[in-house]
Image: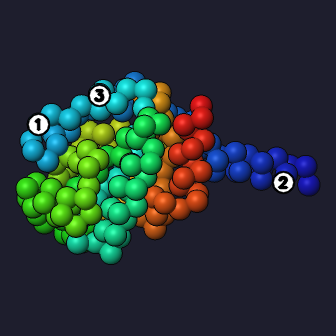
């Protein structure tokens, strides 16, 4: 019986901490750069010491309405050190076919987006943007987007803190609780 309890405790520990045990973080999120929708460099080092929410987005997805809540979170928490970062991707269902200009026009006109947005990139597979390869290497499979509107939260130290699946709305109690706990640290 004692052996069974030890095995269960071990499995629970691995499930809770397993993704982070092998993280060596030879790089931090601040070491990565994207281009914004206008083609200008967007270096994550600009956000050093802030909490970054990286969300792979798509204009023609069933979750696209989450843009509205992303903007609300941005408006409410940017003064507290939160950076909302939209990262367009056409990886899932070809739901982001537009050009950078089309994406920008859509986001601004339909949702009034004012948070930073990157150019369209790959977010999964061996050709993914280096940021996503880094996130997977250091946080495990939960950092790999399974669909559009997957969220990766980067802590003030530049490391992946948590990830949230597409179905988790940015205004959900669970998501906001995670953000607020990081703000307080």
Q: Is residue 64 above or below residue 112?
A: below
Q: In whole angstroms, how far apart are the C-alphas of marks 1 and 3?
A: 13 Å
Q: In whole angstroms, how far apart are the C-alphas of marks 2 and 3?
A: 49 Å
Q: In whole angstroms, how far apart are the C-alphas of marks 2 and 1?
A: 57 Å
Instruction: Name the residue that disc number 2 marks.
Output: 4
Quadrant housing residue 71? bottom left
Pointer 3 local density, CA inside 10 Å: few below 14, some 14–19, many at least 20:
few
- 19 or 173: nearer the eye? 173
Q: Earlier in the sequence, mark 2 or mark 3?
A: 2
Pointer 2 local density, CA inside 10 Å: few below 14, some 14–19, many at least 20:
few
| Disc 2 to disc 3: CB gap under 8 Å | no
Q: Is residue 142 visible?
A: no
Q: Position of residue 154 (x, y in %)?
A: 44, 39
In the displayed structure image, the side of residue 53 where residue 120 appears, left or right: left
- In the rendered image, the quadrant that contains the C terminus is top right
- In the rendered image, the quadrant that contains the N terminus is bottom right
> What number is the disc on residue 46?
3
- Mark 1 secondary-structure assignment: loop
Residue appearing at x 26%, y 39% in the figure: 130
Residue appearing at x 63%, y 50% in the figure: 15
Quadrant housing residue 60? bottom left
Q: How many marks?
A: 3
- Mark 2 secondary-structure assignment: helix
In the displayed structure image, the side of residue 55 where residue 91 appears, left or right: left
Instruction: Name the residue that disc number 1 marks.
Output: 40
């Amino acid at each position: 019986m004692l052996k069974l309890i030890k095995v269960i405790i071990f499995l629970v520990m691995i499930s809770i901490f397993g993704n982070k045990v092998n993280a060596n973080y030879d790089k931090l999120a601040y070491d990565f750069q994207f281009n914004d929708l206008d083609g200008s460099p967007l270096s994550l080092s600009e956000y050093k010491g802030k909490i970054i929410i990286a969300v792979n987005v798509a204009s023609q997805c069933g979750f696209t309405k989450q843009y509205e809540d992303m903007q609300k979170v941005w408006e409410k928490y940017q003064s507290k050190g939160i950076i909302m970062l939209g990262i367009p991707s056409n990886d899932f269902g070809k739901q982001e076919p537009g050009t950078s200009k089309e994406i920008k026009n859509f986001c601004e006109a339909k949702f009034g987006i004012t948070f930073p947005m990157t150019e369209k990139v790959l977010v999964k597979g061996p050709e993914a943007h280096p940021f996503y390869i880094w996130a997977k290497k250091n946080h495990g499979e939960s950092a790999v987007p399974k669909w559009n509107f997957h969220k990766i939260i980067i802590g003030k130290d530049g490391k992946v803190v948590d990830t949230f699946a597409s179905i988790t709305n940015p205004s959900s109690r669970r998501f906001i609780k995670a953000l607020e706990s990081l703000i307080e640290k």
